[in-house]
Amino acid sequence: MSNDPALERFLHSLAARDAPANTQRSYATAVGAYLDWLSARGVDWRSPARSDLRAYLGQLGLGHARSSVAQRLAAIRSFHRFAARAGLSAGDPWGSIATPRLPRRLPRVLEIAEVERLLAVADADLASAPADDGGLGVALALRDRALVETAYAAGLRVSELAGAAVNTLDLRRGELRVVGKGRKERIGLLGRPARLALRAYLEDGRPVLLERGAGRQAGPEPAEIFLNHLGDPLGVRGLRYRLERLRRIAGLPVGVSPHTLRHSFATHLLDGGADLRVVQELLGHESLATTQVYTHVSPTRLRTVYLEAHPRARRDGSPAGR
């Protein structure tokens, strides 16, 4: 990979903005390969010709899927924008190049009944937990129900769910303080079912998991709310694994993930009449445009408003409201 100082500064800027580790790695790979390609052709990355960029775009198209090409180009353009802001180059040379765009996909959303099917699996696990395992089965079932309830109630990202700490949870007020993208803190709200599930897990599940890790851990006990069967923090991979297990047993479609619960949270709020800006705040989105994608997956709310507001929406032809 290229060792250009500009690339190093770009990667440091990503780390300073607390970009996910996967993003940092993929951007390093994409931009590094791009700089190496230009260097091999004797081209200064600060001022490549349009013909050079078209040639590189053509090479990407031969060896990668459209989604991969789009991701690599996003990394390259991000690098050029950073270089321009930092005074390392004049601007983004890709700005005048037509690049392939992927169609915007609507997020997958669960029906309310499907969320309840996930919870029913955890309830079945609780009912069938063996009595001779030291309470482990009960602890895991309580944890899994609390996981789903919390993710769905607060619309959390999977990283926020994994990092949520006990001392940031206020069950009385129904609030969970989390740190999201860019190290920005926000409050996730918890309804009564989520509070009850968390209380049951914290009282009867988490202590069992902590005890299992007490003999191995030399330092202080984990601060995270959700623990694995060894008493260690349940990381992002563990969260995905547990939800995948619930999904499979519940018979839900392949592809349901922790982020699906976040999408469902937003969509169901809008279906219930929540203001888009309120949903934006609850999701922790910087831009309202990011939140607006959910308006395309709320047909129930759109139909209700249409029938109530449009003067010729009624089947009998009478104006609405009369």
Image (cartoon, rainbow, N blue to C red):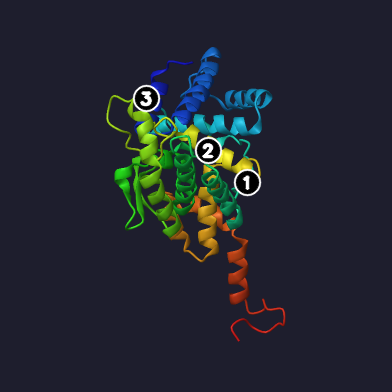
Residue appearing at x 29%, y 44% in the figure: 167
In the picture of the structure, the residue carrying the numbered disc 2 is 242
Query: Between 157 and 233, which is closer to the camera in this rendering?
Result: 233
The quadrant in which residue 50 appears is top right
Name the disc covering residue 250, or none: 1
- Residue 256 location, x and y as percent? 59, 43
Real-space CA distance between mark 1 and mark 3, rounded to the nearest whole angstrom: 47 Å
Q: Which is closer to the viewer, label 1 or label 3?
A: 1
In the displayed structure, does residue 257 sit left or right of residue 7?
right
Q: What amino acid does circle 1 point to?
A: Ala
Query: Between 288 and 276, which is closer to the camera in this rendering?
Result: 276
Q: Mark 3: few, some, or many residues within 10 Å (few <14, many ≥20)? A: some
Q: Secondary structure at mark 2?
A: helix
Residue appearing at x 58%, y 71% in the figure: 305
Name the disc covering residue 9, or none: 3
Marked residue nearer the N-terminal end (2 or 1)? 2
Residue appearing at x 55%, y 25% in the figure: 49
In the displayed structure, does residue 104 sit left or right of residue 274?
right
User: Are circles 2 and 1 on residues that touch, CB within 8 Å?
Assistant: no
Residue found farthest to the bottom: 322
- Residue 285 location, x and y as percent? 43, 49
Marked residue nearer the N-terminal end (2 or 3)? 3
Real-space CA distance between mark 2 and mark 3, rounded to the nearest whole angstrom: 38 Å
Q: Mark 2: few, some, or many residues within 10 Å (few <14, many ≥20)? A: some
- Residue 164 location, x and y as percent? 37, 42
Real-space CA distance between mark 2 and mark 1, rounded to the nearest whole angstrom: 12 Å
Q: What amino acid does circle 2 point to?
A: Arg
In the displayed structure, does residue 125 sit left or right of residue 162?
right
Q: Quadrant of the C terminus?
A: bottom right
